[in-house]
Image (spheres, rainbow, N blue to C red):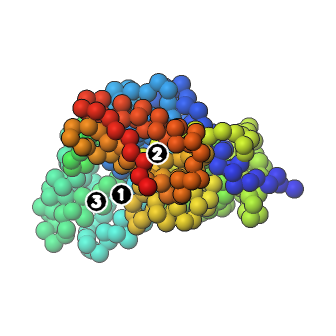
Amino acid sequence: MAARLSTRALGRALLDRQSLLRRADLPVVTAVERVFGLNAQSPNPPYLALWSRLEPFTIAGLTAAIEDRSLVRSTMMRATQHLMSVPDFRFVRPVLAPLLRRVQRNVFGRRIAGVDLDALVKEARELLDGRVVTRPQLGRLLARRRPAADPSALGWSVQYLEPLVHPAPSGTWNVYGPTPFARADWTGVRPEATAEDVRRMVRRYLAAFGPASVSDARVWSGVSGLREVFEQLRPELRVYTDESGRELFDLPDRQIPAADLPAPARFLPEFDATLLAHADRGRIMTDEIRRQVCVGDAIAATVLVDGTVAATWTTSHDNGAAVLTVRPLRPLRSWSPADRDGVAAEAARLLAVTHPDAGGHDVRLAG
């Protein structure tokens, strides 16, 4: 019979594979591959995510990897922006193509009804040949031949239909503004995925987030039809069950840490994949806390205490000082003195990295 894993054991396995039990000493690109991509909806979360996972870590180190194109930012899992290594982008993006086409059709189909999508992508590729333009600029250029279509929807549609990357300085620390588009031909990305590409994605997902179910992998990726893929891989995978008897899969060489292993305080950015990689998020937060953290399309920045979400955090300024405010999501009386000390120390270290030139640093525990 399959071994049964407790929710706490699954949580420790997740933290271990995401380098959140102990910081790893890895090159930036290797670390991004280990966690299988970083959510990059805005520029700073990938930096915050790696700071929580690496020792040493510098903002300049991640910026350099984005600038030299070792890492690329593009529309990926769940049709959201991610930062991935070029080799990972090369094989994962084709696997996600059916998902992205479906999103384009559902979200923008009516706004560009009657537009020949093949011709749209062909023209976009020609417009992007050898140059970079922003999404609004591309939409306006494409609308010259399609005056009845919504320019914004044209630009967004190309983002979903064609493998594109968003080159630096976009996606680097504190750099905001319109999203630039560039062709991704130089990455070697293929137009269509092979069956082995899909199996490879599942293996890599399990390495970064396992043990996990078929539903978990589908929620993380947005890709349908994965049950058949898991069945193909079953002979080479280890099978567990969770406390409810649900079947979980894992790579055979991956160990499950002890459930009582200490887990240090960790600060996670908005949309961190640790909170989004499973259909059942009980291993990282309760349903009650999830409702406070995941509101609409937003996923708050969170604080892990003893391995699970215990608070949210924000930064602000007060008379020139940088302020980090921690807002508990469970009663402070459940926090041990060591928990409080660990959160305060981690917050102080974070401010030293994110606001090195502030006129002071202040950590506040609300409530």
Q: Residue 298, relative to residue 189: is it above or below? A: below
**Residue at the spot 74% in from the left edge and 54% down from the top edge:** 6
Identify the residue at image location x=74%, y=47%. 237
* Closest to the observer, 155 or 250: 250
Marker disc for residue 268: 2
Is 205 on the left or on the right of 119, as rendered? Answer: right
Q: Are marks 3 and 1 in contact (CB under 8 Å)?
A: yes
Which circle's residue, 2 or 3, is located before the other in the chain?
Answer: 3
The quarter in which the N terminus is drawn is bottom right
Q: Is residue 338 left or right of residue 172?
A: right
Secondary element under disc 2, as helix, strand or loop, is strand
x, y percent for residue 196: 61, 47
Q: Which residue is mark 3?
A: 156
Q: Are marks 2 and 3 in contact (CB under 8 Å)?
A: no
Give residue 160's mark.
Answer: 1
Element under disc 3: helix
* Amino acid type at image mark 1: Tyr
Residue furthest out toward the right? 1
* Residue 15: image tag: none
Say if 16 sits above or below 141 in the image. Answer: above
Query: Could you tell me which secondary element the residue under label 1 belongs to?
Result: helix
Where does the image place residue 190, in percent across and percent down from the top left? 45, 45
Residue in view at x 15 percent, y 56 percent? 141
Q: Amino acid at mark 2?
A: Leu
Q: Position of residue 285 (x, y in %)?
A: 57, 57
Q: Residue at x 27, y 54 (%)?
A: 122
